[in-house]
Structure formats: C-alpha cells, structure tokens
Image (cartoon, rainbow, N blue to C red):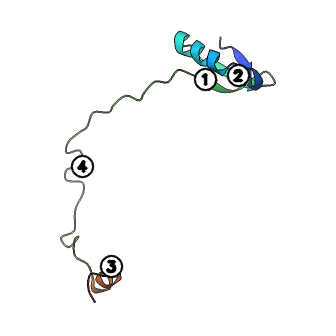
Amino acid sequence: MTKTFTITESKTQLSALVERVWSSGEPVAIGRGGKPMVQLVRYAPPEKMPRRIGAFLGKIKMAGDYDQWSGEESKALGLTD
C-alpha cells in the first residue's frame, strides 16, 4: 500500500522522500485532506525504439519541382528582382 504524505510534509521532507522512492522503488503519494493527488515514482528512462531504415519507403512522394520557386516566391525571398 502506498503511503500518502501531505503537501506540507512532502515539501519539508522532499530529499528523504526521493531517497525512499529511489532505494525501495515503491511510489509515494502526495495529497491534500487525506486524498492522494499526485504520485512520486522512480524515474525509468524510455526504452529506445529500434530504428527501421526504409520504414516510409514507397509511402512518401516528392514532387519533381520541389526545389523550384515561382516568380512571386523568388521575389519575396529576394532571389530575383
């Protein structure tokens, strides 16, 4: 069962609560009026997803003129007069 601390208790004992959660791995609840509001848990870095080379192969199409600017765009970007 998770122990619930008040917000005031958790502010004064934050270092001890962090150490408790880190060493035991058991989460601690912080609440108001005897009701839990949030939970302090041990950080677990997200698992790395394997990179899939070519995952979008054949799903993305590039227009043949993707690198060409219209006259209005060229003027706006200062590429032409």
Which residue is painted at 23% across and 44% down in the image?
55
Name the secondary structure under disc 3: loop
Mark 1 or 2, nearer chain start:
2
Q: Residue placed farthest to the bottom in the image? A: 81
Mark 1 or 4, nearer chain start:
1
Mark 3 or 4, nearer chain start:
4
Q: Quadrant of the N terminus?
A: top right
Disc on res. 10 = 2
Which residue is painted at 37% across and 28% down in the image?
47
| In this picture, residue 46 sits left or right of residue 60 | right
**Residue 28: percent from left, percent from top:** 64, 18
* Type of the residue with mark 2: Ser
**Residue 71: percent from left, percent from top:** 28, 86
For disc 3, the marked residue is: 77
Name the secondary structure under disc 2: helix
Observer-side mark, 3 or 4, equals 3
Q: Distance between the Cα atoms at labels 3 and 4?
A: 31 Å
**Residue 32: percent from left, percent from top:** 78, 26
Answer few, some or many: residues within 10 Å of disc 2's Cα (few below 14, many 20 plus, some between 14 and 19). Answer: some
**Marks 4 and 2: CB-CB under 8 Å?**
no
Q: Distance between the Cα atoms at labels 3 and 2?
A: 56 Å
* Type of the residue with mark 1: Leu
**Marks 1 and 2: CB-CB under 8 Å?**
yes
Mark 3 or 2, nearer chain start:
2
For disc 1, the marked residue is: 40
Looking at the rendering, which quadrant does residue 46 occupy? top left
